[in-house]
Image (cartoon, grey):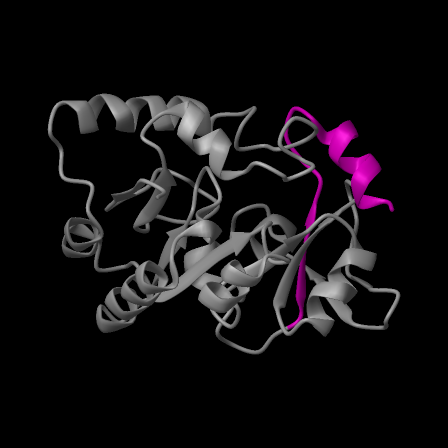
Amino acid sequence: MLNILWAATSNNSKTGNVPTAWVGPTREEARASCAGCPLLDKGCYAHSGTPLAALASIRRAFDKGRDYTLKAALKGARRSARMVRYTAIGDGGRVPTTVADGIVSAVKAAGLDLVGYTHHWREQPVADAWRGRLMASCDNVTEADAALAAGWRVAVVLPANSGDTVTPGGRTVKVCPAIKTDGRITCNDCRLCDGSKRGPVIGFPAHGNQTKAADIGAAV
């Protein structure tokens, strides 16, 4: 069973100040949730960048008794929040369907959109829980076509500095507006990555301190 911690606010300038889920509370638990992802040690920004420091801070507060339940996060959300991010670190795809149902129901009851991704989209239990709710996280445009054929909305890693493009199957790929506008549009403004809604494939040009490694996979 995954341990999901829910923070009411976020300092992430790309997403905006929105309730955010973290798989944890330890780094080891967060990494274990991503087992099987090819980017885990070869280009994952979350596990090699600043989110690790944020997770450590959350863990310290958690150990001191701070309430990181979804109920508390939704209650403490800013009025400007229009979405909940699932997740900042770790892959929340492998929770039971009943847990996924509860998350979706609570977020929708709060009048918010759920925005998140899972690399485990090929696994049937994950598809049963999250298809039509989260985005399938794909490592290249060929894989994106496979996820689309399986009925998922899709987010895909693109080579660094890429613009809008198409998949080999001819599906439109739009670069994330938050990246394209250098943060002038936040995820909270955009919410194109709400997997319950129709929309294009969303492309994320490789970034972070392992851009070269991620670039190689994205070019396949």
Q: Residue furthest left?
A: 65
Residue 102 is covered by the magenta coloring:
no
Task: Count up the numbered dots.
Answer: 0
Horizontally, is 62 left or right of 165 in the view? left
On screen, residue 29 above or below 173: above
Magenta span: 200-220
Q: Residue at x 33, y 67 (%)?
A: 101
Spot occupied by residue 18 in the image (x, y as percentages of width and height): 32, 51
Spot occupied by residue 145 in the image (x, y as percentages of width and height): 78, 66
Residue 198 image-quadrant placement? bottom right
On screen, residue 26 above or below 124: above
Residue 218 visible somewhere in the drawing? yes
Closest to the observer, 194 or 12: 194
Horizontally, is 137 left or right of 4 in the view? right
Spot occupied by residue 207 in the image (x, y as percentages of width and height): 67, 35
Q: Residue at x 45, y 37 (%)?
A: 89
Residue 194 visible somewhere in the drawing? no
Q: Residue furthest bottom?
A: 198
On screen, residue 216 above or below 186: above
Look at the image and tell me in which quarter the N terminus lies.
Answer: top left
On screen, residue 10 above or below 152: above
Q: Residue at x 79, y 72 (%)?
A: 171
Q: Residue at x 33, y 41 (%)?
A: 10
Residue 172 image-quadrant placement? bottom right
Residue 210 is covered by the magenta coloring:
yes
Spot occupied by residue 136 in the image (x, y as percentages of width and height): 60, 59
